[in-house]
Image (cartoon, rainbow, N blue to C red):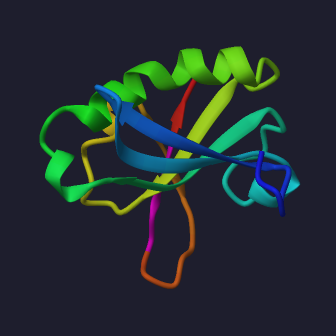
Amino acid sequence: MSVRDPYRHPVVILYRDTTVGFFVLHEGKNIASFTNNRNTMLIRAFSVNLIHQGKRCTKRAFHLLTAFVMKHFPNINEIVLAVNETNKLYEKSRFQDKGIRGMEKIGLPLILQRY
């Protein structure tokens, strides 16, 4: 749980006891612009260290994500992620484009969902 915001949960991605990435799971009413499902978790600030990119760390992290969320947040039944339209990595990780679009300063992100 984040000290300043109890609805944001920082997660470290480990590979062989080495920190390779990081993201934040965000829940609560402040993510309503991404979904109207009250039992949703939004992935924010997902990043993998450059030297570990291309080593399947992201794919493995997303593969484990559903079980992690179910264990630590049993009330959650949907995971969403806002990504740039050109990013196809997330669709390969079982996120689905349901045609929802958000509005961001940097462009029109896809809102991808996973159950």
Residue 98 screen position, x and y as percent: 50, 40
Viewer-closest of 41 and 113: 41
The residue lying at 81 percent from left, 60 percent from top is 30
81 vs 109: above or below: above
Magenta-drawn segment:
108-112
Viewer-closest of 86 and 12: 12
Task: Check the image and name the residue furthest to the front.
Answer: 17
Residue 108 screen position, x and y as percent: 45, 71
Count the marks: how many? Answer: 0
Viewer-closest of 25 and 2: 2
24 vs 15: above or below: below
95 vs 101: above or below: above
Quadrant (top left, top right, bottom left, bottom right) of the N terminus: top right
Viewer-closest of 81 and 26: 26
Residue 7 can be seen, yes or no:
yes
Membership of 66 in magenta stretch: no
67 vs 102: above or below: above
State left or right for residue 49 relative to residue 78: left
Quadrant (top left, top right, bottom left, bottom right) of the C terminus: top right
Quarter location, residue 14? top left
